[in-house]
Amino acid sequence: MLKKVQPKVWWMAAAILVILVISWGLVRKSKSETEMEVVRGKAISKLDPVAIKNPDALTALKISKIEEIFRKKKRAGFNGNVLIVQKGQILYQNSFGFAHIKEKDTLTSASRFQLASLSKPFTAIAILKLIQEGRVALDDSVQRFFPEFPYHGVKVDMLLSHRSGLPNYIYSFDDSVRHGKKYPDNMDILDWYAKVVPTPTPYNRPGRSFNYCNTNYCVLAAIVEKVTGAPFGQYLNDQIFAPLGMLNTFLVTDTTSAATVNRTVGHQYGRRLEKDYYDDVVGDKGLYSTTGDIYRFYNGLTQGLLLDKKLLDEAFKPRSFERAGIRNYGYGFRMHTKEDNTPRFIYHGGWWKGYNTMLWVCPEDEAVIIVLGNSYNRSTYDLKELLAAIHGTDKIEDIEKDI
């Protein structure tokens, strides 16, 4: 009986079976992906702080003190956004002033600020993710990625911890090069170092001492692009921003409407500062973000959503001991250390063309302070009174007034 079945019928039956199997697989995959998105969405939503509905007397007093501190900062000229969270609850959130002072457009929580050097922790995490994946190693030399780089003995871990001894490109880049030239990017800086004669003198021998230098993070961003084959901003978005739901964080070089909406401008002495010659060099600076996105970044990072704990601990490990004191630097993070050299406070600030920024964290008290300003004002960095209100005066006796 089976022999009488025409071959065409067999082929049709087989084709139908294949279609049914594929359709079932696609439905299952679609359902699985939907379920994963729901799970991911729930995980991301947990990264946001929640409002305090009925604060106890101690918390209410703390909030009152913080409010008074920022009233004084406003009188002192602070123009920017603030978010202060403790144990996942919002102690204080507010906006002061304008995104564009001349236009008098009021700042909101959605306003995006140039993070300046507060961009460095993001660059460090981008590199550490590549290290976690085995695509980069801490002891890789820069020549592995850029053979013509003229400074030998400089390794990835030295770039991360500012121990490379490299000269700062902002000061060593010849002024004569600027005339009639486009704004340089990271690769232009590396190409210039490789070709210029004489080679700019390094600050010190590689690994000998700590010297905070923007060139380190300019090179690290270039390494990310070389290894991944993707623009730095795209890698950050794919590997850090999107996984954490950071929808308001973009590089300065991204000129799409999605990237430029709600973007503020920097001011000094009440005047808007125009585009700087080095604005397109990124990694050491260049990110625009909000207080909410920065909180998501730190919260997601410490919850293990980006790096495993062992590698994250390396980022928070002090690596500068030339001078005795509480200040130190890890991989992309500054810190104030305890006597056992573990971090008491983890932080990073920034300044660039009118912008002042600060992320300050006390792991023990689960407190996070984020202050973003777009009109240069030293009060952004004056945190001593604020820390006393949050942690108590006994915990901050040795914290310098100006961080």
Image (cartoon, rainbow, N blue to C red):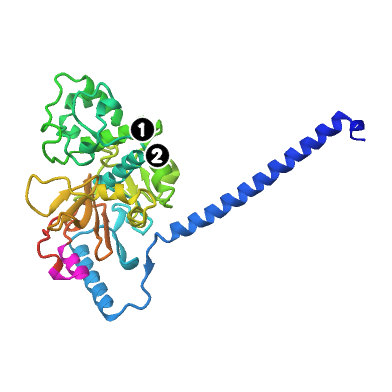
From this view, report whether residue 275 is shown above or below residue 292. above
Q: Which of marks 1 and 2 is nearer the N terminus?
A: 1
Q: State whether the magenta stretch is mostly helix, strand or loop.
A: helix
For residue 164, which quarter of the picture? Answer: top left
From this view, report whether residue 234 is shown above or below residue 330. above
For residue 97, which quarter of the picture? Answer: bottom left
Q: State the SS at label 1.
A: helix
Task: Name the residue that disc number 1 marks.
Answer: 225
Near mark 2 (Cα within 10 A), the count class, few <14, some 14-19 or many ≥20, is some
User: Quarter of the image containing the N terminus?
Assistant: top right
Compared across the picture, whether 101 is left or right of 31 comes to left
From this view, report whether residue 163 is shown above or below residue 321. above
Q: What stretch is highlighted in magenta?
A: 384-394
Q: Distance between the residues labelled 1 and 2?
A: 8 Å
**Which residue is more in the foreground, 90 or 151?**
151
Measured as percent of width and height from the top left, residue 70 is found at: 23, 66
For residue 83, which quarter of the picture? Answer: bottom left
**Marks 1 and 2 in Cβ contact (< 8 Å):** yes
